[in-house]
Image (tube, coloured by chain):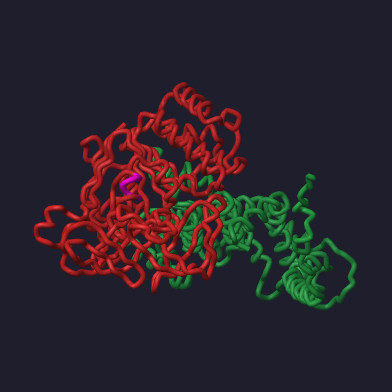
Amino acid sequence: MARIRLHHITKAYGDTVALDDISLDVAHGELLVLLGPSGCGKSTLLRVMAGLIHPDRGGVEVDGRDVTTLPPRQRNTAMVFQSYALYPHLSVRRNLGFGLRAHRRPRTEIEEKVADVAARLGLDRLLDRRPRELSGGQRQRVALGRAMVRDPAVFLMDEPLSNLDAQLRTATRMELAALHRSLDATFVYVTHDQVEAMTLGTRIAVLDGGRLQQVGTPAQIYDEPANVFVARFLGAPPMNLLPAVASSRDRRVLLEGAALSAVLWEGEVAERAVTVGVRPERLRIGGAGAAGARFRSRVVAVENLGNDEVAICQAAEERICVRGPRPLGLRAGENVELVASVDDLRLFDPASGRRMVWVPDACDNHKLPAGTVHDVR
Amino acid sequence: MFQVTPDPRTDSANPPPPPRRGGGRRDTTIARHAVLIAVGLLVVAPLVWLILAMFRAPRTLFSESLPFKPHLANLAHALSELPWSQLLLHTVTMAIGVSLGQLLSGLLAAYAFSCWQFRGQRLLMLVVIGTWLVPFQVTILPNYVLLSKLGLLNSVAGVIVPQLSSTFAVLLLRQHLKNFPSELIEAARIDGLSSWSILWRVVVPNLGPSLAALEILLFIGAWNEYLWPLIVYRSPDSVLQVGISHLLSVTDPDYGALLAAAGLATLPLLVLYLILQRRIVDAFVRSGLR
């Protein structure tokens, strides 16, 4: 088990900045998920931790020891790759023991550890096979076993499930979670799959364009996104975002948009533009007199997801989605008023994209200050 | 009343198989085969002519038409005139030395250029490519002088040493290594191997087919080398290609014996090919050297 500390990591390739001043702490025994779209820098950051890439600026500490300039073999980390990176010319047995042989461990120790890990992962009968004779799931286990054999303090995983089919991915995901609980090690896990991130991670770090967007528990990331990028990136469908104007009347804060209106809380605010966000599953089909924010829209299409239905609606210039148990009771072409509780609304600053919160102290100033945004770090 | 739902596999909703394509495809196939046969004949024709020439009567190469009575005199003359055991020994030594040397130096250079990053890498690569553009004739004199100073003239070593590196080998292996999965090298680094160990324990074992294909090409090239051995190792028991040329005299060239000797000189390569045929084809297919 180890604690990893990244401070001000910056890495550029020519004019392209892959990592932009990233500082991040990974606690002992934590499973931190690096989540983001393709090209956001998450794999580069993992390779910086592994020692495969040297940062242009900043440093990496493991348990307080500066390892920034140390080669990978001196960092006590193991890595599972997206392609598994099994040595094609070696049997499963020799693949599993490769790292120990490279570190010149005694033969008896190698044999014992390989047998132990093979038994734990159900690879006993496959030890004499070559990687090409294994299925995708078996290869994934061998890759995991190769990392486990070395008994590292840190496991680095680069999208290890992305080459598996959906069914196997779910099963392996659960096994990985169980493995993390059973091993006394710190895990850093890279993925672009939000389901993996939400189900596996004790914390999630969301990256975009080489910058850290938000770090938090899965619930924090989903419920309280730090900015519109995180709001859009998580959720299927993602959070609905609509432009509106915040103002106050009769000491109540109001929201008015082309297709929405809402009465929020008591207070006064100078008129200003905001972006209103609401999760699709938090929207209900409104009836007469239903309280909360109201969205006037027209149903464009209804998608059947099996257990749920998603209605895609046109609300003025914006598309919004509503998700609920099947049947939703909506048909394409029908006008519908959608309702959301005030507690389920999230407000973002349109200029910076960052989430805004109502600060009670600000009531005294009768303003909704633009600067009162969440600290994403 | 219960009713069993229809089996979707036999359901009429399943789309029918796609219609077979028309006769246009057949015409194209015939045309392609015709072109391939023509090219094949062009390639084989000189070899057939060489084999036929080996069995003609002496000095009837340009006078006797087909069919002719097979004769072994040309072969006998070639066999008796040349010191075959010496020539073969020198040629095999030279071809193995040159091809393995080029393979090794090419591998090391290509590994450095493709798998690692260092200052001045691009410039150095351009220099390597640039050496390919320098005509062989330009290097003859300096190499000759150098060999003379080293005392390597008229020896197999003198043929081998200046040819120990090959730009072609560097470029070809660099291309193969650029396609080599970088994650395998990263995995080996994390597993604790040095860059030298990664080359021998991870890269080379997985580059087998490409290395085999290149070694075959280099071996054939070295085997057929004529001009350089002719300059630095001009003796009757030099290497095969130079030795054969001694059958030519300016006043009375015996083309029959020369072609018989040339035919015999191709035999070792032919036997090697027959033994390794499957491996060679496999190596070429896998390495993309088709």
Task: Say which of B254 and B138 sits in front.
Answer: B138
Magenta span: predominant SS is: helix
Return the x and y of residue A255 as percentages of the image width and height. Answer: 27, 65
Is A286 one of the magenta-colored residues? Answer: no
Left or right: residue A135 compared with residue A277: right
Residue lying farthest left? A364
Q: Report the quarter where the N terminus of chain A lies.
A: top left
Tell me how many marks there are.
0
Q: Is residue A339 above or below residue B131?
A: above
Q: Is residue B290 left or right of residue A266?
A: right
Q: Position of residue A257 (x, y in %)?
A: 31, 70
Chain identifier matching the green colour in the rendered picture: B
| B249 over A83 or under it: above or below | below
Location of residue B288 by image quarter: bottom right
Q: Residue furthest front?
A: A289
Which quarter of the picture shows residue A102?
A: top left
Left/right placement of residue B248 relative to residue A339 reads: right
Report the span colored magenta: A218-222
Residue displayed at 28% across by 52% down = A214
Q: Nearer the viewer, residue B76 or B140?
A: B140
Residue A129 visible in the displayed image? yes
Q: Is residue B141 visible?
A: no
User: In this view of the protein, which residue sits in the foreground, A280 or A253?
Assistant: A253
Is residue B30 placed above or below B173 in the rendered structure? Answer: below
Q: Percent x, y for residue A269?
A: 16, 64
Nearer to us in this view, A124 or B217: A124
The chain painted red is: A
Left/right of residue A131 with respect to residue A338 in the rendered view: right
